[in-house]
Image: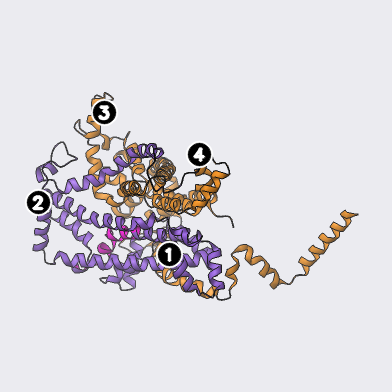
Amino acid sequence: MAYKGHRVNPSKFEKSQLKLILAVLPIVLLTGLPIIFIFCHALKPIDELFAFPPQFFVYKPTFENFSKLMKVSRTSGIPMSRYVFNSVIITGSVVFFGIIFSTMAAFALSKLRFKGKTTMLNINQAALMFVPVAVAIPRYLTVNYLQLTDTYFAHILTLIPIPVVLFLIKQFVDGVPDSLIEAAYIDGASEFKVYRTIVLPLTKPAIATGAIMTFQQVWANMETSNYYINKESMKSLTFYMNTVANANNTVAGQGMQAAASLIMFVPNLVLFIILQSSIMNTMAHSGIK
Amino acid sequence: MSEAVMTATADATVAETVVKPEAEKARVNKPKRKKKFATKENQNKAGYTFMFPFAFLFVLFIIIPIGMAIILSFTNFDTLQFPEWIGFDNYITLITSDTIFMKKVLMNTIIFAVAVGPGGYVLSFLVAWALSQMTRGVRTVFALIVYSPTMTGGVAMTVLWKIMFSGDQTGYINSWLINLGVITEPIIWLASEQYLLIIVIIIGLWSSMGVGFLAILAGMLNADESLYEAAAIDGVKNRFQEMIYITVPSMKPQMLFAAVMAIVNAFQNGAISTQLAGNPTPGYSAQLIVNHIEDYGFIRYEMGYAAAVSVVLLLLVMVFSRVANALFAEKE
């Protein structure tokens, strides 16, 4: 029988897929460990957290760690809801504006022509290769000079430009056929229209990937709260969760830290589940045919 | 006879090219460099408009700080007093008298990068390729799990791996190896100069399926399906040939992105060693360049020196990414 060609994204299960599943399964099991662990760890009672030898699984699950965390946050001067609010505002704005600005820039770098374009591309590529640790202090000086300290702008503006996200989206815009854009120009479309009706819909997988990445970075970011913000009430949830766990005595702190890392992890998981269908979206080319 | 005619025509063409006015020449050359539609006169303006919001923040919060860091690398800066200009002294010290850097750190980083860079890249590609051949439900669950180490991040990872590699006979890895008869005495993994780098490499590979992996997966699933049908008709015989002749060439931009990410991650991943064994790691056995930078910048407060090391690291990464560029860049 002649080889018919395997379709990517098969619609139904065939026997030939079984070997692939079996081949990938060990990797999946290994990489799945932290998810299981993070849930187990948060539910461990204190004696299991400090068990010797240390344990992977939880045997007597309890919500004790969460209630302790809640109790501590109730007694602190600033309610936890304030930190949640801060983090939602910060993360929301950065993801929203970051994606808009990055897609716009990616469109310009990939499909428009202007002076300095190649230079800009090279600088962006170099910037993403520079270790973030070395830039921490100079960036603090910049923020300070611009008098952004203790404002939401310090959180948001500094995190919007992510060279990796621009590079990622630009690579996907490269894949949008020129003929499509040319046709739109002939029909009299403006650059903005091309961007909105052709580039954005066709780079959905990149936008989703970029959004996940931006979210992860911003949500877990402690640098802005550490360096640019002195007011307690302006700090982020991540910062708060970390200080709660460290400020209290180490024994109780361990449990709260475990609960906190689960709470901080769950939004990542939810966002990934929401956006995964766009990443693995196989409809992108239907517009081209 | 016919030869003479041909020469005459050729001469005529040459003459024409020479006579062509400068402006026209430019117009002829341009489309070769970029697409035809880009000759619209307002391209420049639109390009800047679309570029502006990102570029503005990018320059302010990334380029200026990086520029300052590069300038700091020529100074002696203890984060308190005003930096003192010392020229190339930091670089000279780094190359001639920082024995830890030359003997341990550089070697470790290169070993780690060579193992985790290409290793992680190939792993990401193969897993993404396998997933692309599966049905939607299985693929979604698998992709989520494979990507999850990137999401759970620092804390969970540290505690998890510390438990696995716990140094007495009750630690998971030790007790398995003892039960299997591979070792008789427990190994103190995280304090052993012999094994620490290997453990860091294993964890590096384990967590290497990040954004690059997602980009490859997205690229594969978005490939034009008619290509596969056409290839089958043209005599492609199996999945392997399909992968080499169709999948890879049709997603070069994504392959390049993933390659650059693999290189950057391989050189900038310092968190694993620090979280497992502290900074500096025992006997500098798993000290990577990033840890060296953190050591000088945030423990010894020699920010100028730390900046110089970062510049050297940047150069190192750029050299390697040139290779990736040469492999996957679109030829225009």
**Residue topped by disc 2:** A64
Question: On screen, B203 above or below A141?
Answer: above
Verify CB contact (< 8 Å) between mark 1 and mark 2. no
Q: Quick check: do tags 2 and 3 share a chain?
A: no
- Taking the spot 25% from the left edge, 45% from the top edge, the residue there is A34
- In the rendered image of this protein, does residue A176 appear above or below residue B223? below
Of the 4 image quadrants, the one containing the C terminus of chain B is bottom right
Callouts 1 and 2 on one subunit: yes
Helix, strand or loop status at disc 1? helix
Q: Chain of mark 2?
A: A
Looking at the image, do the residues carrying marks 4 and 2 touch, with CB atoms under 8 Å apart?
no
The Cα–Cα distance between marks 4 and 3, rounded to whole angstroms, is 40 Å
Give the magenta range: A212-231
Q: Chain of mark 4?
A: B
What residue is disc 4 on?
B238
Q: Quadrant of the N terminus of chain B?
A: bottom right
Palette colour of chain A: purple
Question: Residue B42 lies in magenta, yes or no?
Answer: no
Q: Which mark is residue B177?
A: 3
Please determine whether, in this image, residue B12 is positioned above or below residue B297. Answer: below
Q: Nearer the viewer, residue A141 or A155?
A: A155
Q: Residue at x 33, y 58 (%)?
A: A275
Q: Does residue B324 lie above or below B50 as drawn? A: above
Image x and y of residue B283, in percent? 31, 38
State which quadrant residue A243 falls in: bottom left
| B11 displayed left or right of B141 | right
State yes or no: discs 1 and 4 in contact (Cβ < 8 Å): no
In this view, the residue in front, B289 or B216, is: B216
